[in-house]
Image (cartoon, rainbow, N blue to C red):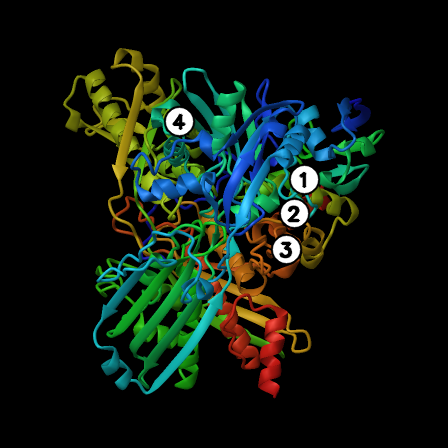
Amino acid sequence: MARTHVTTVVNGDETEFLTDDSTSLLNALRDEVGLTGAKEGCGTGDCGACSVMVDDKVTCACLVFAPEVDGSTILTVEGLADSGELHPLQQCFLEGAALQCGICTPGFLISAKALLDKNPDPTETEIRYALAGNLCRCTGYDKIIRAVQEAAREMRDQ
Amino acid sequence: MAITEENPGYKWVGTRPIRPDGLEKVTGKAQFGADLMLPGMLFGKVVRSPHAHARIISIDTTAAEAMVGVKAVITGSDFPDLAANGAHPSEIDVANNTIAREKVLYEGHVVAAVAATTREQAEAAAKAVEVTYEILPHVLTVDEAMADDAPLLHEGMITKGVDPAPEEASNVASKILHERGDLDQGFGEADVVVEREFTTKPVHQGYIEPHAAVADANSDGRAHIWCSSQGHFQMRAYSASVLGISPGMLKVTAAEIGGGFGGKTVIYLEPLAVRLSQRAGRPVKLVMDRDEVFRATGPTSGTRIKVKMGVAKDGKITAAEVWMAYEAGAYAGSPVGAAGMTAIACYDIPNFVVEGYDVVCNKPRVAAYRAPGAPMAAFAVESVLDELARDIGMDPIDIRLANAAVEGTQASYGPKFPRIGFVETLEAIKDHPNYTADLGPNQGRGIAAGFWFNAGMMSSATVHINENGTATVVTGSPDIGGSRQSMALMAAEELGIPYESIKAVVADTETVGFNDVTGGSRVTLATGAAVVDACRLIIEDLRARAAKTWDVELDQVEWVDGQAQHVEGAQPPLSMKDLAAKSGRTGGPISANASLNSRGVGAGFSTQLCDVEVDPETGVTRVVRYLTAQDAGRAISPDYVEGQMQGGVVQGIGWALSEEYIHDSDGVMENPGFLDYRIPVASDLPMIDCAIVEVPNPAHPYGVRGVGEVGIVPPMAAVGNAINDALDVRMTDLPMSPVKVLEALNEQRD
C-alpha cells in the first residue's frame, strides 16, 4: 500500500515522514517521528493527553489524520524548552509540584501555553475553562492551576 | 497550618524541593508504558468477548493467522491449565481473568490475542478471529446475583465464612461478620435511631494512561517485560504463574506509570505479550484502548449497604448495624472485607454488627481502588451519622468528637489503636476559617470522616555512595506520585548530604531486592524505612572507615552533618566526599542493602468539609469550597502529601456527583469513554484546601503513616451531607447526578 509523504516543521525542525492515510497525527509523531511526549489517554479527544499545537492552535493529535498536517508547523512538549532552558510553565510545574504521575503533563503544558499566548493575564476561572479539555486524575487540578497562575505572572514580569 | 507536637528540626524532611524525576516529565522524556519501541517490535491486539456471560464453543484462528503481517495468534489453550496443575484458586482466577478458557464472564473478557507487523494489521487480524459462543443468562448487580435461582458464574462456588457451609452453590463467594456487645440493648439505650439504605455503582480508577506492556522473549524461555504497573515484582509473580514458569525466567522493568490508584496492582497484558513474543520470536507491544480499560480492567464495586444507628441525646452512639453486599465482578475478591473493617472504625461503639457479602456478577473483575471498599461504607455510615446529629441538634464535628476513636480504643475490627490522629483532624476542620465561612442561597455544608489502615508489607532498598560522595538510592517501588522525592529527602536527612546530591531511582526485578506493590499507602512508610535502614548501615560503615583511617576505636567517631567527626576533635573531620575518594583503601565501594517486613503501620484518618451549591431548577450540584484535614504522621514531602490529599478528594467528588458504570440489559457497558464516564475536569472544581495534621507514627523513624488512600473515603458523604444541608434532601444513591437530585426535590415538593 502506498504511503503518504508528509512534510512539516516539528519543534522548529523540518521533518518529513511517511504515513498511512488512516494513521493519526499522534501515532505518526510517536511511531514515525519518534516523539513520544504526546500521550494517548483515550483516542477520542476527551482527555487532552495528546495535545499539540498545529499552526498555533491546540489540537488533539489523536483526532487528526497525519496527512492533514502536511505543510503545518507543529509544537510538542519536546519543543517547549528553548536550547535546554525550560519554558516558565515547565519551571512552574516543577516548582509547584503540579504533576504526580506526569502522563497528562505534556498536554497540560501545551494547552496552558496556548492560553497564555492569547491571554497573558487569565483569571482562575479562565484557566480552569481553558484547561477543561485536559484530564488529570492525580492532582485534583489545584496545583496545576496555581502553576499556570505563577507562570503567567513570571511571563508578564519578563 | 500543620499541627505539630514538636519542631523536629529536620533539614530536609518536610521541605519542598523539585522532585528527582520532574525534569523528564515536563520535557516529554519520561518513558511510560506505551512509549518503548524495540527493533523489530510487533504490535499486538486483544480479542474480547462481546457477551456478558457465554460458553466458548470454539475459536477459529485460521483466517487471522493467514493474514498479511500476522506473526502470532494465541488463545486460552496456549497457557497451562492451572486448575489441572492443582494451583491455588486465586491463581486460577488470575489466569482465567487474563484469558478465558471455557466461559467468558463479562463483556470485554479476553478470548484471544494477535501480534502483527503494524497496528492496523493487528486490529484487522483481531477482528478475523472467529469465536462461537453459547450465550448464557447473566447477572449484573448484587440483587440479581443474590436472587433465588440466579444463574451461576462459577458452578462450584460455596459461600465461605458461613457455618455450617451451604450445600448449594451460589454467587456469594464469602460472608464477613464483625460483632460486639448487644445490639438490642444498644438500640434500647438510643434516643434517636436512623435506618437508611444506600446504593453505589462501580466506578473506575480512571488513570489517564491505559495499560501497556512490551515483552521480548528469548528462545531459552526467558523474557523481559517492560510495563507500567504498581509493582513489577507482583507483575513478575502473576505473569510467571499464568505462563507456568519460574519467576526467575522473567525480568520486569518498571516503566513510568501514568496513574494507577490500585488498578495497576494486577496483570492484564503481560503474560499475553510474553506468549505472543515467544510464538513470534520478536518483541511485542500490547496497549489497551480507553474503552478496553473501562470494559475489562478493574473498577471498584457497586454496592448495596444498609445502616441502622442509634444515639443518645448526649451524642454517644449506642449501637450500629451495617449490612453490605459488594460486587466482585467476575471472580471472588471484592473489597467487602476491608469495608467491614473500616465501616465504623472511626468510632468507639459499644454494640454493633457488621455483616458483608462478596458477590460475583458478570462485570469486569474489580481491582483495588484507593482505600478499597472503605468509601462506599463511609458514604452510608457518615450520611446516617449526619442525620443523627441533625435529629439531636448537635454539631457534626461535636458528634464525631463525642465518639472518636483515640489511642487505646479497641478498633471495631479487633486490635487496640496505637497513637492516632483522628481527633486532631476534627479539630483542624473546626479551627479552619472554612468552617464558619458564610453560605449563600442554595448552598450547604457537609462534614464527613474516614479511616484507612495503611499497609506495611515488604520492601528492599540499596544505597550506593558514588566516588564523589553523592548517593544513589535504589528501590523497587514504582513511583506513582512523588515517592522518589520522599526517598531522597529521608536519605539526605540520614546521610547529612544535600538532597540534590542524591539520585533516587526505581530499579528492575534483577537489580534490587523484592518490593511489594506500590499500594496501601505503603511506599514512604515501608520502602522509606528500608532506605533509612540502608543509610544507617552506610553511616556505620563510614564511621568504621574513619576509625580505621584515624586508628581509633569506633566509639571515638560520630557522624554529624554529613561528616565523620572525632568525638574529642582530635582529628580533622572526614566528609562524605573524603571518605568516598578513599574508599578503595578503606574496604572498597561503599554500599548497603536493607530489606524489611513492615514494623508497624500507622492508621490514617481524614475529616473533610464540603460546601456545595445546588441549582434547584436543574439539580446540578457544584462544589464551591472544600477543605480536607488528614493525619500524615509526618509529611516528608508536603507538596506531594497535599497532592495525594487533593487527588483523593477530587476522585471522591467524581464518585459523588458524576461517575458510574452504565450497562445495558445485555450486560454491555454503555459509557466506556471519558465523554460519557465523566470524571471531574478543572472547570468543575474550586481549589482544594489542605490541613496536614502530623501525629507521628511511633513505628516509623520519621513518623510516617502513609497518605495515599484515606482522602477518598469521606468525600461522597461530605458532598451528600452538604446537599442535604442546602436543600433538606437525603441522597442515598450514587452518583448524586442532577436527575436524581431533581427527583429527590420533586418528591419533597409533592
Q: CA distance from mark 2 to mark 1?
A: 8 Å
Q: In which quadrant is the N terminus of chain A drawn?
A: top right
Residue A47 bears which disc, if any? 2
Residue at image mark 1: A50
Q: Say which element carries label 3.
A: helix
Residue B264 picture location, percent across and down: 46, 42
In this view, A8 is above or below B628: above
Q: Say which element carries label 4.
A: strand
Q: Nearer the viewer, residue B205 or B645?
A: B205
Q: CA distance from mark 1 to mark 4?
A: 33 Å
Chain name for mark 1: A
Q: Say which element carries label 2.
A: loop
Q: Amino acid at mark 2?
A: Cys
Q: Nearer the viewer, mark 3 or mark 4?
A: 3
The reply to whether callout 2 and callout 1 are in contact (CB within 8 Å) is yes
The reply to whether callout 1 and callout 4 are in contact (CB within 8 Å) is no
Let me know if marks 2 and 4 both belong to one chain.
Answer: no
Residue beneath the point at 40% across and 67% down: B148
Residue at image mark 3: B682
Q: Nearer the viewer, mark 2 or mark 4?
A: 2
Chain name for mark 4: B
Q: Nearer the viewer, residue B367 or B147?
A: B147
Residue B472 bears which disc, if any? 4
